[in-house]
Amino acid sequence: MQTNVTKEAKLLKVGVLGCGSIGQAAHLESCSKARNIELTAICDVADDLRVKMAAIYDPCKTYHDYAAMLEDPEIHAVVIGISDEFHVSCAKAAIQAGKHVFVEKPLGVSVDECLELKELVDKSGLTLQVGFMKRFDGALQYAKAFLRGPIGEITTYKGWYCDNVGRKTVTANVMPMLYSSDKMRLPKEDARAVRERYNLMAHGSHLFDTARFLAGDIISIEAKYAQKRGLHSWLVACEFEGGVIGSLDLTVSIVQDWQEGAQIYGTGGTVFARMYNPWEFRAATVECYDGATHLSHSPYVADGQFYRRQLEAFADTVLHGVPSDAATVDDGIASVRAMIATYRAVHQKGRRIDLKDVEGGM
Ligand SMILES: NC(=O)c1ccc[n+]([C@@H]2O[C@H](COP(=O)([O-])OP(=O)(O)OC[C@H]3O[C@@H](n4cnc5c(N)ncnc54)[C@H](O)[C@@H]3O)[C@@H](O)[C@H]2O)c1
């Protein structure tokens, strides 16, 4: 049978670990449609789920056992889409087996385990990319290029990420039907049970990574947190490298439409970015004002499928050495540090936390 997808001559042979929500909503289809990837294998301990996904996505082979998939010499890279608690151990096993790794965000749940992974990655020479897909939003990439040029020196970064009460309605409409199984491998403790930690890890990771992507490294954090009847809100004051000051707002879930964006002030211009619920697959609306020409520039980006675009960039890097905007293991560690610092700053009553001193977990 034929499809509407055109593949390049050289394809990265990928095994996807995890046929759960993110596998079904993003990775399996993205690997199938990516111009430079072959969906060589899928792996999940939940046999019913794996069989169902194999029927839909038609990989060359399937594995119940992750170790067996890692032994397969035909597979060059793995895409890891499983619970946060399992990321580091599965990524380590893949690196030890000589496979390139794409691993979902957050990189891990503690700084220490992430540093162990980094040591292995650095020694291996293999590529490890963290799944911060917003870096592959073409409009944000345009903004980043502008920030390197006409904007001059940056003084201020304001970022906000407010998940909303209607999100599940929207995602249920736009995602494929999601299957689950009582045979899925899940951590002993349900991460969602402790909302403060869960929201920081699941949503805060995007807020911090986008801030770092656009404004550079975060040096220190002070934070305040309020929670009322399931509405969780953090205000974070941060200091970036180069003397940039910043404020970040993470709120889950506001009683309004999804609100996500950034405003950046520079000596030569200003950037405003509005992002959307990622499952709408819509590139950000970006306005870059150049003070020298008195003109605003707003890119139009048709391809908002950043989940696929991040995997195509991963494959380009592995196959052809093409550098990309991807989050590296160091970026993954930096965002884990920022989340833990935020958690500690709140629990230590507004104390300023230097990110370089952050060890352990929440
Ligand atoms: N980037 C994004 O926008 C985004 C969105 C949602 C989720 N995520 C991330 O995706 C990750 C996965 O989330 P999810 O909700 O899809 O998880 P999930 O629990 O729904 O699915 C994980 C699947 O992996 C399987 N699995 C786990 N360990 C395994 C092993 N060792 N061997 C074989 N199978 C194994 C489980 O059986 C399960 O079916 C999380 O880290 C989450 O933060 C990212």
Image (cartoon, rainbow, N blue to C red):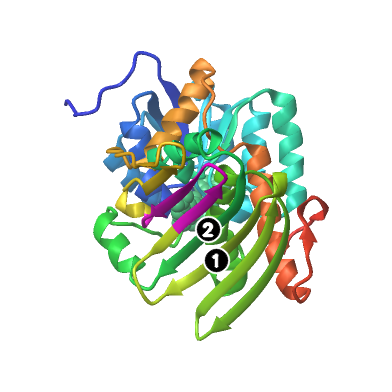
Tell me which label, 1 or 2, sits earlier in the chain.
Answer: 2
What is the magenta range?
261-277
Question: Relative to 354, is 19 above or below?
Answer: above
Can you give x and y, in whole percent of width and height, for residue 34 in the image? 35, 30
Asked whether the viewer can see residue 212, the reply is: yes
- Helix, strand or loop for disc 1: strand
Q: Which mark is residue 159?
A: 2
Magenta stretch: dominant secondary structure: strand
Residue neighbourhood size for the residue with mark 1, other residues' Cα within 10 Å, grouped as few (<14), some (14–19), many (≥20): many
Identity of the residue drawn at 40% across and 15% down = 10
Asked whether residue 186 appears in the rendered view, the answer is no
Circle 1 sits on which residue? Answer: 249
Q: Is mark 2 within 8 Å of ligand 1?
A: no
Q: Secondary structure at mark 2?
A: strand
Q: Quadrant of the C terminus?
A: bottom right
- Image spot of residue 96 (x, y percent): 68, 30
Asked if the residue under mark 2 is in contact with the one under mark 1, i.e. CB atoms within 8 Å, the reply is yes
Name the amino acid type tagged 2. Answer: Gly
Residue lying furthest right: 357
